[in-house]
Image: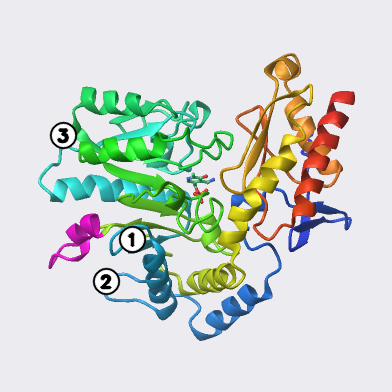
Amino acid sequence: MAEVKHDRFVVDRAEGVWLYDADGRRYLDGTAGLWYCNVGHGRTEIVDAVAAQMRRLDNYFTFNDYTNEPAEELARRLSAVAPMDEAKIFLTTGGGESIDTAAKLARLYWARRGQPERVHFLSRRQSYHGTNGLGTSIAGIEGNRDGFGTLVSDTTLVAHDDAEELRAAIESIGPEKVAAFFAEPVLGAGGARAPQPGYLEAVAKICAEHDVLFVADSVIGGFGRLGGWFGVERWGLRPDLITFAKGVTSGYLPLGGVAVSAQVADVFWAEPGASFPHGPTYSGHPTVAAAALANLDILEREQLLARSRELEGPLHDALLRLAKHRAVAEVRGGTGLLGAVEIEASVLADDKGLITRMQKAVREHGAIVRVLAGNALVVSPPLTITEDELTLLAETIEAGIDGALAT
Ligand code: PMP
């Protein structure tokens, strides 16, 4: 059998906004890993908090009346900043598990409220909601849902930018059959697309008018990426549920969760004898919670949420230097510390591998970017990046695009 050759890019160590490969070459981490390393790499404060917690109580479950102080404190701190009334926090191990948790909470909420026919989920084309069963079933990126056989039934996709299409879909399905609408505030994997002005406010209103639960998927948007704690504050939204992950620990350890408004949570946690029959093994893991607490300390002390808001304009400006490039169709940014450089369809048309070669050429020039939606180079740097480094990131992207076009 012929030997299959795989390219490997071995990441060896990281410090601040810089990664180092096995040969000691350094790269600007333009993506903060997978949108998560908001406080940057090499924070010994998080390492020390994790080690101390491991020595005291390495792990334990949080089912029934079992709990631990780091998980309790994390839930208290997240609840205090969640944009909803008396949020309850359900902890998981990542984004996809949080989406599935939110979906099950939504359906069971309606069943417990005596409306078991409210099972339908709506989501947006080009959305990404993780790799688990429900997240795959509501995925808006077709390639992520095709080929897996029968998925969860009662799901409908609507346009990502048309609130009236959501209203029409709810009305044609029948509001009495709809459980929830899922939306990323800014579409991440779909290519770093900010919402049209007024879109999110309009869909939140449409959901409220039809008693449909509004689930904000802030797995990318939270913990400063979009300038607030839960990724929805800048639009004044108060969702019924918010899924989060990534930036809650800056990726140092895997953690996610769902913030649940009191109105929904009370069905499960306030009524005597009621419960939510859903318990991931590592929910409330004390060591992971300790990493999150140390990460929140850094975000607060260094005022990184405000810094993200300050840097979103400079990041967008830096990327805009590429807007006039002959290979560039569009530059997106200015809503949070993320952005995209979309390559012209005509440039990519007869060269399928070009976009990946561009990404690798950017890396050769010293920066990490990702290819998303098949046509965009996407960035989401650590919130600690400097303005000079943002300029360097944009210059490196330009050099990589030019380098790939020249080959
Ligand atoms: N939702 C969104 C918006 C995401 O971007 C992601 C991951 N990129 C997920 C959910 C799934 O998170 P995880 O990979 O941690 O399961």
Q: Do the residues labelled 2 and 3 touch (CB within 8 Å)?
A: no
Please tell me in which quadrant of the rendered image residue 69 appears: bottom left
Q: Which residue is at 37% across, 40% downward? A: 201
**Residue 4 in view in this figure:** no
| The magenta stretch spans residue 266 | yes
- For mark 1, what is the residue? 279
Task: Indicate left or right for 286 with 332 as reference.
Answer: left
- For mark 3, what is the residue? 176
Mark 3 close to ligand 1, CB under 8 Å: no
Query: What amino acid is labelled 3 in the image?
Result: Glu
Q: Earlier in the sequence, mark 2 or mark 3?
A: 2
Magenta span: 262-275
Location of residue 9 in the rendering, given as x and y in whole percent from the top left corner: 78, 47
Q: In which quarter of the image is the C terminus?
A: top right
Location of residue 221 in the rendering, given as x and y in whole percent from the top left corner: 51, 50
Q: 191 above or below 92? A: above
Q: 76 above or below 189? A: below
